[in-house]
Amino acid sequence: MTRAVTAQGDRLEVEDVVNSGVWKKIGEIKSIPEIGETAVKLDSSNLESEMREYIKGLSDQNDLEFTFNAIPTGIEGSNIDLMRGLSRNGEYRFRWISPRLGIQVIWRGEFAYRFGAGEVDTVRDLIVTVIPKTRPIESLISSQYTVTYNANGGSGEMTDKSSPYENAAIVTVEANIFTAPEGKKFVFFNTKTDASGDSYDEGDTFPIYKDTTLYAIWSE
């Protein structure tokens, strides 16, 4: 069965120039450009015919434009503060990570940022443009993620014996063995304590892309 994926969970990070190997996430990502390289071809005309020649090894990378929700300065996790802290004249390593695809891509390059036009009642955009100076380096993600069950007001313990899982592995939701709070009954599991997240019935399956806690949801 084919399981196509969305860009949900994708992120863009920039390497800390002081602490090599430490990556800082640019938060609140909204849209992602095409990633990778396109085939470069040389066009030439000869009367009514056209010749197209593929030039192997010639990099063809467009500038990469990522869009974020702008997080104001002075707030923890502000992506504006992060970008303002980078040198406009410097080159940095940028890393795009797609947990759902199981790959990451790294470039070294320059950057620019700007604020998108906005209406008075909408969230402002922070638009970050990465200007690659190297070819993209693509690699697989080998992360493992855990599944934890939480009684969420009930009692008892549940353990997923298959946890941790490899990235994108299929998780089967366990049958509930928690004891319900007095006067309540089990309904389903959810990724949020108030049932506002993703809901799963016993026996449901889902691909895992991050550490996941499943909370028991109870009703009167």
Image: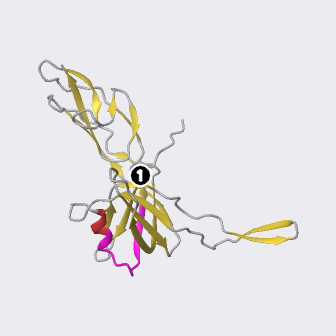
Residue drawn 13% across the image and 24% down it? 181
* Stretch in magenta: 83-96
Residue type, label 1: Pro
Please state, as top left, top right, bottom left or bottom right, where the N terminus lies in the image: top right
Q: Position of residue 118 (x, y in %)?
A: 38, 57
Residue drawn 61% across the image and 63% down it? 38
161 versus 175 height, above or below: below
Please state, as top left, top right, bottom left or bottom right, where the C terminus lies in the image: top left
Residue drawn 30% across the image and 72% down it? 84
> Which colour assignment does the render follow?
secondary structure
Q: Is 5 or 1 nearer to us in this picture?
A: 5
Q: Position of residue 94 (x, y in %)?
A: 41, 68
Q: Is residue 118 magenta?
A: no
Q: Position of residue 35 (x, y in %)?
A: 52, 60
Q: Based on the displayed image, in which of its 4 quarters is residue 40 positioned?
A: bottom right
Q: Secondary structure at mark 1?
A: loop
146 versus 14 height, above or below: above
Q: Residue furthest left?
A: 182
Q: Position of residue 9 (x, y in %)?
A: 38, 50
Q: How many marks?
A: 1
- Please name the residue that numbered disc 1 is placed on: 99
